[in-house]
Image (cartoon, helix red, strand yellow):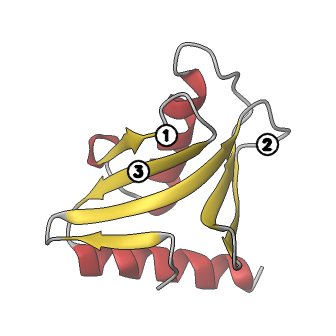
Amino acid sequence: MASFLNPVVTDGVHLTVKLTPKASCNCIESFTESVNDNLLKISVTTVPEDGKANKAMINLLSKSWKIAKRSIRIVSGVTSRRKILFIEGDVENIKLILKNYVKKHESS
């Protein structure tokens, strides 16, 4: 699995993301892996005021990956574009969800 996804014990994973607020669409743009940039790029149309962009990002991930919103939380970078999320749940199940999502969108 990509290096932006890091297993955490047995109760979930950390996910490194770069959030772009005020974008033209709500979308999970890409999984970027390069020497200096290992993260998931996410865009939301919402403004970054009062946590609105963060909430929109969590809603997008929850809907796209069919994961409960309460299972996704920001552990680092609340006011930054670069964030670390914690996704609570079975590590293998989360990896499978992400793997299937990547396959589905690579073939599009």
User: Residue drawn 81% across and 37% down?
Assistant: 23
Disc 2 to disc 1: CB gap under 8 Å: no
**Is 48 on the left or on the right of 59, as rendered?**
right
From this viewpoint, which residue is outermost toward the left?
Answer: 10
Type of the residue with mark 1: Asn
Q: How far across and down, in percent of the image, does residue 34 sit?
A: 71, 78
User: Residue drawn 71% across and 43% down?
Assistant: 26
Q: Nearer the viewer, residue 96 or 35?
A: 35
Task: Please tell me which of labels 3 and 1 falls first in the chain.
Answer: 1
> Residue 24 is drawn in which quadrant?
top right
Task: Please tell me which of labels 2 and 1 falls first in the chain.
Answer: 2
Q: Secondary structure at mark 3?
A: strand
Type of the residue with mark 3: Leu
Q: Which residue is mark 3?
A: 85
> Residue 19 is drawn in which quadrant?
top right
Mark 3–mark 1 distance (CA, rounded to whole Å) = 13 Å
Query: Of discs 3 and 1, which sits in the foreground?
Result: 3
Q: Which residue is mark 2?
A: 25
- Residue 59 is tagged as 1
